[in-house]
Amino acid sequence: MQALLTPNEMARADQAAMAAGHGGADLMEAAGLAVALTVLARWRRGPVVVLCGPGNNGGDGFVAARHLAEAGWPVTLALLGDLAALRGDAAHHAARWRGGVAPLTPAVLHGAAGVVDALFGAGLSRDIEGVARDTLEALAASGLPVCAVDVPSGVDGDSGQVRGVAAPADFTVTFFRKKPGHLLLPGRALCGELVLADIGIPGSVLAQVPPRAHENDPALWLARFPWPRVEGHKYARGHVLVVGGAVMTGAARLSAMGAARVGAGLVTVAAPASAWQVYAAALTSIMVQPLAHAGALDEVLADTRKNAIAIGPGAGVTALTRRHVLSALATGRAVVLDADAITAFAGQGECLFEAIRGPCVMTPHEGEFGRLFPGGGGKAERARAAAARSGAVVLLKGADTVIAAPDGRVVINANAPPELATGGSGDVLTGLIAGLLAQGMAPFDAAACAAWLHGEAARAFGPGLIAEDIPAQLPGVLRMLRDSPLPRRGIT
């Protein structure tokens, strides 16, 4: 159920279902009925306007209108275009509608208590113009309750971007599987409550339409989570090395705490000798190793037991940071690159990418991402292209964090609350990823797992969150995961 289908993939799933004997008209009937039942369950009876477009989304609207009318609701149906121009299943269900059909104009909204938006579906390929744009702008300004069919009209189901205009919905009814645009911003904010309806498409069609993207969820990686084993010891649980800076010392300390809380057996912060006392005074269970000269990190890295390296938080955008990054990557061990470790290679991405020899996760926010990977496009596609180009797992941060692997897999994280927009929270995330890598989790799993844990810990804490609260909240989240009925491995 975590699979996300692009509009093109959803169309192929529809075709596969129909080839397996599920009629298109029957699927449309089930979709429209799901919309009507959702409206009946959420709104008080009153005048409803159903806005129908010229395609299959409009056909769903005709079905929904019919069922609402049969339930005794006053229904006005407005159509974009000519009734005679409808084709296929949409024409079939339009013929079953016994009410009038008004032309689409903003005026049809007058007197409505609620609106069903069935103008355009997720596969819209151009900006909305003309009377459709005028009507959606009027709908957005009206404050009326809105139920969107599949997506709010104007939202690109692939990227979540708005094609010219879109009216926000109170809830959106979609079918079979969610789409990336339901989770990516701004689409996610426009969808309101998302209702996923079963319309009879069998899950077996995913064998013919394998999804390339999923919504982040423990079901994707929990079976490979590195739970402590009864025969284990601290050295078996990995050793994270966090490379700290001389000035912004809090960043590396937050990363170190994240790595420790998520289960790394040992954590060491390697810090400039000038700041060693600051780190040592603030950290108890975490070791601090001074770097007395420019090449000192190479000496620290000679200890191969330090099997995961986190570098970037508070490091400074300097030549020394570049040197430290290249030294870490040269080991072939697992490396997490964040913040200054990314910005230090601005405009020189190929130098960085060529140095990646082992497992690597990069965790840029949009600004840092643009310094290595200029260009536009949807967030998921940009992250996927960046991972393929760099050879690293790319975790592109935000309220709609995207994790992409070099092989094309993508996970979209949707559990991050707005309270995570606070200084230092990304540093904790870096530590979480490094801690999971040290315990043997694969980079893509580690990044997805860390992003989910990060969001869940913040949600559990709630308002007033600061970065230091995230590691402290992790034990409760991990306890909940441990007790989950989902498949687990290594729990003793």
Image: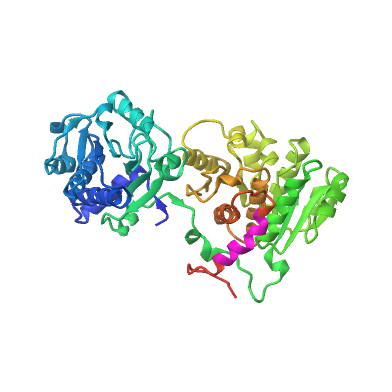
Q: Quadrant of residue 232?
A: bottom right
Q: How many marks?
A: 0
User: Which quarter of the figure is the C terminus placed in?
Assistant: bottom right
In this rendered view, identify the residue nearer to me: 28 or 319: 28
Q: What secondary structure predominates along the stretch shown in magenta?
A: helix
Q: Would residue 301 appear left or right of 389 to someone viewing this image?
A: right
Q: Would residue 50 appear left or right of 2 to someone viewing this image?
A: left
Percent position of residue 478, x then y: 59, 64
Q: Identify the residue at image location x=51%, y=68%.
A: 484
Q: Quadrant of residue 161?
A: top left
In this rendered view, identify the residue nearer to me: 404 or 70: 70
Residue 134 in the image: above or below residue 403: above
Range shown magenta: 470-480
Residue 237 in the image: above or below residue 370: below
Q: Can residue 107 be seen in this view?
A: yes
Q: Is residue 392 visible?
A: no
Percent position of residue 437, x then y: 63, 57
Examine the structure image and report whether residue 492 is included in the region drawn in magenta.
no
Residue 417 in the image: above or below residue 159: below
Percent position of residue 127, x then y: 36, 28
